[in-house]
Image: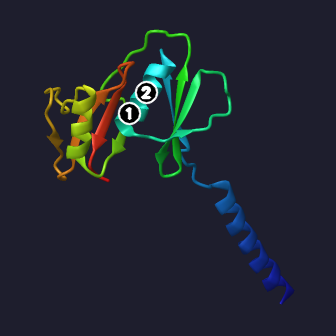
């Protein structure tokens, strides 16, 4: 009986330890390096209407936004160095109403395009999801889709 107890205890211990050791990582935030904090913070606030979060640094070089799903966007100003920007490297936000979102873009004078680069056009993926691409003030590509 003692032997069975130790075997069972060992199995339970190994089971608990294996779950602890291989815990899945999760994303908590996205950081975007920008040239002008105010210009970029205004963009993310006005285009996406993300609520601004209190940021701990209080140095005038950071702005944090709540982007939903317990995630935040950290906009960080630093001395600007040229970077390579490619449409394949983008972040994506999903919206519940693509038409309303596009109306807001038009009101703000923000250009959008489909994946091939046709200005003012909306892509429809093979799965029926609509998507467009815009650029933030520093040229980063952002996909917006209605997979909400």
Picture quarter with the N terminus: bottom right
Residue at image mark 1: 46
Image position of 74 (left or right of 2): left
Give x and y (percent) for residue 59. Answer: 66, 22
Image position of 115 (left or right of 26): left
Residue 119, by quadrant, is: top left
Q: Secondary structure at mark 1?
A: helix
Look at the picture and state if 18 lies above or below 84.
Answer: below
Q: How many marks?
A: 2
Give x and y (percent) for residue 139. Answer: 35, 20
In the drawing, what numbered circle is on residue 42?
2
Badge 1: how crowded within 10 Å, few (<14), some, or many (20+)? some
- Residue visible at 16% across and 49% down? 126
Give x and y (percent) for residue 116. Answer: 16, 29
Look at the picture and state if 81 lies above or below 33.
Answer: above
Task: Pick the residue in front: 61 or 81.
Answer: 61
Q: Residue furthest right?
A: 2
Res 24 visible: yes
Give x and y (percent) for residue 35. Answer: 48, 15
């Amino acid at each position: 009986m003692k032997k069975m107890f130790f075997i069972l205890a060992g199995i339970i211990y190994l089971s608990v330890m294996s779950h602890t050791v291989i815990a899945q990582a999760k994303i908590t935030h996205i950081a975007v390096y920008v040239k002008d904090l105010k210009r970029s913070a205004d963009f993310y606030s006005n285009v996406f209407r993300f609520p601004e979060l209190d940021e701990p640094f209080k140095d005038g070089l950071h702005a944090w936004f709540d982007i939903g799903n317990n995630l935040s966007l950290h906009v960080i100003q630093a001395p600007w160095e040229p970077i390579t920007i490619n449409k394949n490297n983008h972040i994506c936000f999903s919206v519940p109403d693509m038409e309303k979102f596009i109306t807001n873009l038009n009101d703000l004078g923000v250009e959008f395009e489909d994946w091939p680069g046709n200005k003012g056009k909306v892509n429809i993926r093979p799965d029926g999801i609509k998507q467009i691409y815009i650029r933030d003030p520093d040229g980063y590509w952002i996909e917006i889709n209605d997979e909400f």
